[in-house]
Structures are given as C-alpha cells and as structure tokens.
C-alpha cells in the first residue's frame, strides 16, 4: 500500500512542472512593508509529491498562496513563478481565473470552514466542474475575457445535467458513498473527513496537473488522516499529478512524499529527496525538528527540543534567522545570510555550518531508546482519584412530531477508572469520543447523569460550589488553547498569583514572589512577567497556564490536550517541562489527548476510548506493544511513522464513527471493525481484564487470550 | 424548515402580541382616570359617573380587562373620543398613505444602502471606501426633522420646485422619502460593508477563488448569500425605525398618514385611537420579526437543522 510508483528517471534530468525562483512576498502593514518570504527557490517535478514542512510562521502557506495569487491586494509578490512555460505572476485576472482550478488546484486545512455553508455539496462540486472543464487550458490559446465569459455561459447551459453526473463520478472516485444523497446535503451535515473528500473532488474537477494540499489532515482524526493520505497517494498513482503537501508533521511527509523542503522564517533551509534528508539531515533546524519528533514506536525519557521559538517577521535580525536557536552557530551566522546551495544527491542547504552524521542530541536519544521508563510510585493502597461507573447523557431533541422526541446523546457511557498517587493516567480517543466530557465531569463542570467521582476517598461529584472551592486547591487543570485560557488584559505575573489571592493562602507580599519563582523554574525570563498574554509565544503561554495551575501545589492535574495547539518544537519543550515537574512535585495526572505518541510518552497507564466507553486499558508499554482491541490496533497503525520507505501492514478504518445519539446494539465499534463476527452484533462486550492489568472490551480478544 | 418550527414561531408571536395588549391595558389604567382626562378637572361628579358607566369604567378591573380582550377579538378598540367613530376605522383610513410612503422609502433605502455597502467592502481600505463611509456617517448624523426642514427651505421656500405639504402627486414623495432614506441607507451601507468584509475573509471565499470562479461570481454567489444572513437581522430593526422616522417625517411634511394621526390623537387625548395605533405598530413589529426569523431558516441551512433539532 505504501509502494511508490516507479521513477527510474533521475530528477535532475527532468524538467520541473513548476519552478519558483527568488520569490519574495511583502505585506502592507500600518508600519510599512513587512517581508514574509525572503527569496524562495522551489521546484516541483511532474508526478512527484513534494512535502513542504515548517512550523507556523515559516511561510509555507504564503508560498503556495502566492503561486495561486490568493494573497489579496495587500501583498506585494516579486520573483518568478514558472508554470510550464508561463510566468504566473505576469498573468492578468482573467488568465488567473483560468489557471486556478484547471492547472493548479488547492485543498485547504479546515474542510468544514473551507466549504460554503449555504450551498449544497453538489452545487459546489458542479460549480468547479463548470468553471474548469471544456474550455482550453493555459498555454493552448489565449481567449479574451469576453470569450471566456461567453464560453462559460454556453457551457453552463449545455452541461447542467452532465455536470451533476460528473460530480457523482468524482465523489465516488474520492470514496464518498451514497453520492445522490450527498449531492443535496450541506457541509455541516457531513463529517470533517467527508468534507475533505468533497474538497478533493472539487479540486480534481479540472484535472489539474498540480495539486496544493495545505495541511489537508491537520483538522482531522488520525484514522481519518490515514484515509485521506491514502487517497492522496492513490490519486497521484492513478492520475499522475504533482502534489505539494504542506504540513507541520514530518511523519506525514515521510509516509507520502518523494521530496522534502524545510522552511524557516520565510526561507527554504533545506531540500532534497525524503530518504536522503531523513537519513542524513544536515541543517541544524531540520535536525532539531527530526530529533524532537515523538515516535509511536519508540519511547525516550527526555525529548530533544529546540530552544526558544520562531521569531515573528518583524523580529527578524540581519543574519540567519535560526541563529538565536542554533547550537552550532558560527560568528558569521549573526551577520550574514546563508544562501541555498545545491549539494550532492539533489540536496540543497542554506547553512554556513552544515552538520552530518548523528548529532549529540541524536546519540543521547538513541542511547535511551527502549529504556523502560519507570517512575517511583508511592503506593499507599488508596487511589487518589476514582471514577465509578460515570455516565453522562445529554438530552437532545430530534425532529419528528410537533414537539419532537427527546433522545439521549451518550457522551460518557459507563466509565470506571482509578488513578494512583503519582501516576499519570492517559485517555486517548478521536474527536467526539467523550474524553473531554470526562475531564469536565472530573472537574464538576458537568454533573454526571449517574456514577460518582471520588477524590481522596471522598465523593466529590455534585458537591455545592462552596465546598468545591476547597477541593480545587488540590485539583487543577490545563486546557488546550493557552491564549483562550488566559485573561488577555491581565499581566502574566498577576495571573499566576491569582489563585493564591482567590484561596487567600499566603501574604500579599509573598504572592508575587512565589509566582515569579515558579515562572523562573519554568524557564520564563523576568522580562515576561509584566507582559500580557498575547505578547508571549504559544509555548510560553502554555507554561504560564501550567504555572497558574501549579502554584497551589495541587495533588492532581488534569490536562486536556495541553500541547495540541503548539508547534512540534514547542510541544517537546512543554512535554519535557510537564515530565520534570511531575517528578519534582509528585503530581498525579490525568492526561487527555488525541495524540497517541504523546500519551505513550507521558503516561504510565492509558485508556482508549471509543464512543463513550473505554475499550482498552493497559500499561502504556503493553498497550503500544501488544494491544488487544482492534480499535487500538487500528489507531496505532493509522499514526504515521517518520521513517521513509517503511513498509508496514496497516489497518485502515472505513467510514466515520456512528453518531452517539443512536448507537446500534452490540459492540459500537463493529461496523468499522476488521475482525467483527456475529456475536459482536448481538452482545455488547464489557471491559474484562486479560493480564498485567490490561483489560479490554472485545469478545474476540478474550477468545484469543 | 419544519412546519413545527413555523407553528412554534407563530405561537410565540401571538404570545408577544397578547403581552403587548395587556401592557397597553395596564398602562392606560395607571396613567390616570380616563373620565377625568376627557372632561378635565372642572366637571361635576355626576357627569363623571355617567361617563364612567357609559365607557364601562365602573366595573371591577378584571371585568374591564376581559371586556377589553373580547372587544379586541371583535375588532372593537373603542371609539374615538373626538368624533365617536370606530377607532380602527379612523386609523385604517390613514394606513394606505403611510404604507405607500414606507414602501417607497424601503425600496430606495435598500437600493442605495446595500450596493453602497458592497461597493465599500470590495474597495476596502481604499479612497472609495473612505469616501462612501464618510458620506454614510454624514447621512447618519443628520436628524430627520432637521433634514426635512432643510429640504423644505431649499426646494419649497427658496427654489419653489417641490410642494412642502400633502401627498397627492409623485412630487410630494420626493422630500419625505429623501428625509427618511438618508439615515436608513447610511445604516444599511455600514452594516452591509462589515457583513461583507467578514464573509470575504472566510476560508470558503478563498476556496471559491482557488477553484477558478470569476471574482464577480464569487461576490454574487458565494459572499452575498452569506452576508445576507446578517443583513436580514437589520431588516427587523428597519421596520421599527421606518415607523419612528415616519411619525416625524409625516408631521414635518403634513403627510396625512398614521404618524400624523398619532401626534394629533396624543395631543387631543384620544386614547382609543392612540391605543389602536400602538397595537398596529406592535403587530407590524412582531410580524416583521417573524418574517426575519423565517428568513434566517431559508437563508442558512445550518439554522434550519439546528431548529428542527430544537423544536
């Protein structure tokens, strides 16, 4: 499934389909022109997948938007973008409209937001077909504006029906079932994965030779990501078009791309064939990115992380943009800008001091690979946190009848677990599985429909607010988006000191000192203390949130997707900090995430959740090495591994999870399960223990054991 | 859109009207003794008693309320104290004149306001945008009565081009319509501009451009239907301000409509007529909002689904 099409011809002998040279983009801001791209050179060969990688602010999206001229009137684009024989930057508005969708098509990150909410799926695909077929493409003839308009008009009248047939064909091509029904539906009625397929169908309408996919799977769950990436690979195989895949995820690149270009601060810092760069990365930034990757198939104690964060365009200094974060920087790097130089084997690099072989970071990491990861656990019998048969139903009214029937949405459907002191318990699952509802139940934001939460042996669910306040002293939480969790009009230090004020536990003069001390221990510099949240980077913000949660020295910390909003290099910093702090403070943690790689790294025990139920609970290493539930196995196999050319057998889950409102009888996973039998449809499996504390809710796993 | 949803909305509208009707009743009773108000303070107790009996004011308050409600159902809102005719009839005579003025004003307002807003949004942050918005702010800041008087001074008194009072010919419409439309069109221009700007920044607009839809079509077929959802919200308020603006404008230009009748009736303490007009205004406001609500569902499929789940 992973096989790449045969490409005997050497890249250097082929002519690129798209050649970007010296592309600069400036934005008109109130303080003058702001340069966001500094001379990008990039080429795409026919039939290849080019991975364009970088953290947020690296300019990868701007590059691709520039070559479609989608940046709007406030952007000044200079340089040369040669598509076939034409310079895209010299095209007029009519020619651009012609080129878009027909020669180059684009798929965006958030498929639900990227489709027009008031038009049906069918109308949007048909529109793409109408505007992108029938009239000669670029370079053949050059019709005038009126001619084009006339042809579009004529075309529209002729092919209204044909276009619908073609739309259905495209939809089934990209794996959308029940196309007739789907045509009439609106984007909000479909899942994210389905919407992304619609976007791809729309992009394919004009049979473009180049497809730009801008983070096409970032907003999707892992199992859906695996489906979409497989679809993209298949399309390349079948149609042979070139694809630029923009992503922040190097693992995705390793699994899909032929060539790779790494961007940093509006420049390409390294590019070349994927295998070459993964096996021998030479730019310090590429090396850092690769080293800080979390891998599902390995476990290490301390993650490598790149110090600092990506500077904003207005903070840029004279020399190499990476110099402040670089460990091998030379004096030259401060003053001069390294140019992108072509090296052997089709690799190019922009660095005065390119590295090779395994760096210090790599060797340290490799030594620790596979080292079992043991935390001292103070076992004193009683668990710190217990959840007993938690149930949370939301009442939903569905259509039908004059007043409608009330139905239950079973967000959490009978979940029990206990967390020992000093332990980190992970809950993983895809969006909508109910993992965040559990966090809210633990924190008393929701009251459980039935069941109870016990903290320190006392029942805490349903307590009145006044008594909750005392418990919150011992129980703190960190949520996903740090900027939303912070008060934007309050200084950092005051926010961190605020819990002390609320609980009135130390003297006024001590509060700021304590807050400052804690912030310093989290590697936040003094100058940040009197700033406001928006002035800090995402990683710094999340550390402030963490400091605010920890200043009360809680026993329990509940983290709901604490790193999902952060860049890869920053994510590693925050995870390392969390690991260090929990050892220092002997914290007990409940760690909720969709990302199995992080959960594996952080947690001792992990529960896998599907549609409101735990389907498997096991010690972390056991779960990742010998998972028993088919859903866990599928999740694990859906995660991309940053090793190009790795051929592994994968389980692809089909379709989307069913709605938690009308759950079928029997096992709720059986419709997507690759080993389901008759019994799965009749009887709902309960969570039963296997061995070594591993328990699983699957009829077939128990039969096997 | 489900039928339940429409029924529920209509039911809510009726509930609102009942609350308004009750409120009018209470307001009228606590505003003082109607008999005294009509006859004035220098009147004999006997005359007052007779009047109270004639108007049913001597009955217990709850009976008065029930009679009042049942009268409304029979289309009887009392008689004008001035000429003894049915109040509804008195008001109904004036409705066509007011409606014709409102209708013309509404069309002119929307035809100027919405395109101006779109034009401004499409030329965001350019000179054209700034000029349009400056004009809008100017239009917004001139009070109706002042603009009306200004127009009369200019076109009727100095230039003698247009009639200053009455409603007989199309020429009579020109100044009242300009007076009312100016501020309203300015409001619509500003609102349409911001609605369009928000929509134009949405990812689906970028998608439409990226798939090769010509810019004109992107604006008309992708941006406008989405912006319309927020513009429709304005329509509800628009009816309200048309009515308020109408009262002032009708008086400035001696337009024989409901607004003028309202002012006269208030001056003459003709409570039955005032009450009828207030009821008419609230009815039209409730209807306008009902239409706005239904229009949401028609314009926005997300709302449609949300509602059928709620209902």
Image: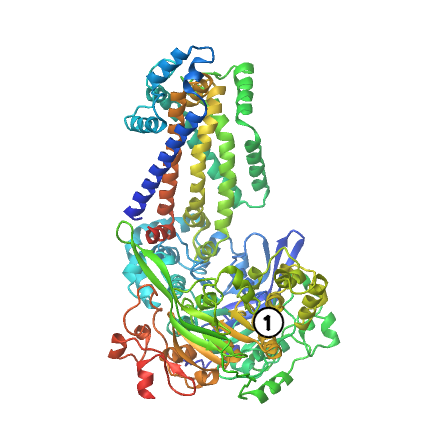
Badge 1 density bin: few <14, some 14–19, many ≥20, Cα 10 Å: many
Left or right, B161 with respect to A667, comes to right
Query: Could you say where residue B130 lies in the image, as x and y percent from the top left?
Result: 59, 40
> Which of the image's four quarters has the N terminus of chain A?
bottom left
In the rendered view, how is the structure colored? rainbow
Q: Quadrant of residue A429?
A: bottom left
Q: How many marks?
A: 1
Is label 1 in a helix, a strand or a loop? helix
B188 and A556: which is toward the camera = A556
Query: Could you say where residue A634 lies in the image, as x and y percent from the top left?
Result: 39, 78
> Which of the image's four quarters has the C terminus of chain A?
bottom left
A398 versus B291 height, above or below: below
A136 and A341: which is toward the camera = A341
Residue under numbered circle 1: A570
Q: Quadrant of residue B157?
A: top right
B310 versus B162 height, above or below: below
Left or right, B158 with respect to B62, comes to right
Look at 35% across and 43% down and name the residue there: B294
Query: Could you say where residue A703 lies in the image, as x and y percent from the top left?
Result: 30, 86
Query: Could you say where residue A408 lies in the image, as x and y percent from the top left?
Result: 33, 62
B300 and A206: which is toward the camera = B300
| Res A571 visible | yes
| Res B79 visible | no
A324 and B24: which is toward the camera = B24
Q: To which chain does the residue with label 1 belong?
A: A
B146 versus A217 height, above or below: above
């Amino acid at each position: 499934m992973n096989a790449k099409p045969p490409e005997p011809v050497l890249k250097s002998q082929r002519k690129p389909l798209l050649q970007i040279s010296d592309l600069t983009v400036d934005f008109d801001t109130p303080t003058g022109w702001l340069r966001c791209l500094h001379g990008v050179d990039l080429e795409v060969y026919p039939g290849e997948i080019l991975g364009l990688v970088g953290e947020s602010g690296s300019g990868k999206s701007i590059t691709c938007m520039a070559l479609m001229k989608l940046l709007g009137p406030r952007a000044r684009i200079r340089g040369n973008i040669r598509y076939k024989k034409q310079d895209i930057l010299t095209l007029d508005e009519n020619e651009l409209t012609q080129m878009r969708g027909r020669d180059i098509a684009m798929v965006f990150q958030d498929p639900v937001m990227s489709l027009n909410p008031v038009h049906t799926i069918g109308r949007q695909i048909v529109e793409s077909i109408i505007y992108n077929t029938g009239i000669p493409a670029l370079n053949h003839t050059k019709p005038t504006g009126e001619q084009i308009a006339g042809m579009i008009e004529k075309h529209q009248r002729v092919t209204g029906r044909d276009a619908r047939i073609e739309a259905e064909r495209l939809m089934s091509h990209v794996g959308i079932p029940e196309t007739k029904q789907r045509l009439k539906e609106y984007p909000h009625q479909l899942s994210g994965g389905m919407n992304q397929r619609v976007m791809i169908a729309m992009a394919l309408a004009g049979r473009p030779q180049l497809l730009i996919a801008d983070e096409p799977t970032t907003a999707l769950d892992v199992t859906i990501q695996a489906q979409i990436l497989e679809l993209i690979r298949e399309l390349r195989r079948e149609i042979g078009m070139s694809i630029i895949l923009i992503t922040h995820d190097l693992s995705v690149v390793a699994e899909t791309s032929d060539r790779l270009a790494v961007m940093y601060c509006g420049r390409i810092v390294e590019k070349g064939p994927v295998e070459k760069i993964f096996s021998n990365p030479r730019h310090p930034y590429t090396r850092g990115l690769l080293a800080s990757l979390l891998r599902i198939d390995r476990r290490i104690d301390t993650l490598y992380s790149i110090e600092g964060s990506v500077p904003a365009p207005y903070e840029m200094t004279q020399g190499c943009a990476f110099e402040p974060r670089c460990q091998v920087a030379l004096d030259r790097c401060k003053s001069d800008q390294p140019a992108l130089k072509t090296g052997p084997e089709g690799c190019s690099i922009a660095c005065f001091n390119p590295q090779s072989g395994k760096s210090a970071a790599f060797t340290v990491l490799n030594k620790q690979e596979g080292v079992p990861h043991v935390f001292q656990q103070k076992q004193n019998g009683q668990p710190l946190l217990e959840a007993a048969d938690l149930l949370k139903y939301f009442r939903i009214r569905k259509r039908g009848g004059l007043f409608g029937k009330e139905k239950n949405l079973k967000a959490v459907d009978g979940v029990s677990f206990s967390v020992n002191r000093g332990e980190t318990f992970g809950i993983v699952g895809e969006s909508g599985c109910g993992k965040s509802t559990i966090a809210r139940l633990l924190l008393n934001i929701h009251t459980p429909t039935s069941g109870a939460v016990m903290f320190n042996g006392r029942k805490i669910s349903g307590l009145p607010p006044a008594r909750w306040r005392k418990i919150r002293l011992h129980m703190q939480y960190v949520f996903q988006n740090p900027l939303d969790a912070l008060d934007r009009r309050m200084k950092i230090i005051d926010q961190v000191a605020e819990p002390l004020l609320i609980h009135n536990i130390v003297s006024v003069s001590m509060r700021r000192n304590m807050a400052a001390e804690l912030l310093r221990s989290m590697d936040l510099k003094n100058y940040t203390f009197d700033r406001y949240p928006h002035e800090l980077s995402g990683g710094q913000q999340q550390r402030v949130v963490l400091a605010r949660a920890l200043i009360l020295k809680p026993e329990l910390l509940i983290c709901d997707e604490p790193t999902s909003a952060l860049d890869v290099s920053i994510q590693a910093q925050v995870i390392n900090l969390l690991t260090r702090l929990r050892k220092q403070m002997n914290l007990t943690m409940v760690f909720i995430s969709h990302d199995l790689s992080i959960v594996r790294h952080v947690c001792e025990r992990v529960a896998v959740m599907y549609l409101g139920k735990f389907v498997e609970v096991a010690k972390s290493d056991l779960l990742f090495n010998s998972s028993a539930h088919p859903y866990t196995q599928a999740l694990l196999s859906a995660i991309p591994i940053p090793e190009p050319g790795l051929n592994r057998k994968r389980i692809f889950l089909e379709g989307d999870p069913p709605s938690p409102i009308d759950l079928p009888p029997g096992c709720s996973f059986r419709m997507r399960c690759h080993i389901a039998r008759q019994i799965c449809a009749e009887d709902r499996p309960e969570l039963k223990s296997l061995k070594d504390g591993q328990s699983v809710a699957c009829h077939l796993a128990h039969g096997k054991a | 859109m489900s039928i339940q949803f429409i029924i529920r909305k209509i039911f809510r509208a009726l509930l609102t009207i009942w609350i308004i009707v009750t409120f009018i009743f209470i307001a009228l009773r606590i505003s003082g003794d109607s008999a005294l108000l009509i006859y004035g303070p220098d009147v004999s107790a006997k005359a007052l008693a007779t009047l109270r009996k004639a108007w049913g004011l001597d009955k217990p308050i709850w009976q008065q309320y029930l009679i009042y409600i049942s009268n409304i159902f029979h289309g009887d809102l009392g008689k004008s104290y001035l000429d003894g005719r049915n109040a509804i009839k008195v008001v109904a005579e004036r409705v066509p004149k007011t409606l014709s003025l409102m209708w013309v004003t509404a069309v002119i307002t929307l035809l100027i306001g919405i395109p101006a807003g779109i034009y401004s949004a499409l030329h965001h942050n350019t000179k054209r945008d700034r000029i349009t918005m400056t004009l809008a702010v100017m239009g917004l800041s001139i009070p109706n009565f002042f603009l009306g008087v200004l127009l009369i001074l200019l076109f009727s008194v100095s230039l003698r081009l247009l009639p200053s009072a009455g409603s007989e010919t199309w020429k009579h419409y020109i100044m009242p319509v300009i007076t009312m439309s100016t501020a309203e069109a300015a409001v619509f221009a500003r609102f349409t501009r911001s609605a369009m700007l928000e929509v134009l920044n949405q990812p689906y607009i970028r998608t439409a451009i990226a798939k090769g839809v010509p810019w004109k079509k992107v604006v008309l077929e992708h941006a406008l239907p989405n912006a319309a959802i927020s513009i429709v919200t304005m329509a509800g308020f628009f009816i309200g301000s048309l009515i308020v603006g109408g009262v002032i404008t009708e008086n400035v230009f001696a337009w024989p409509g409901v607004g003028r009748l309202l002012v006269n009736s208030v001056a003459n303490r003709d409570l039955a007529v005032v009450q009828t007009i207030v009821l008419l205004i609230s009815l039209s406001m409730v209807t306008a909002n009902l239409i706005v609500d239904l229009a949401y569902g028609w314009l926005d499929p997300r709302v449609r689904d949300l509602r059928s789940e709620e209902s």
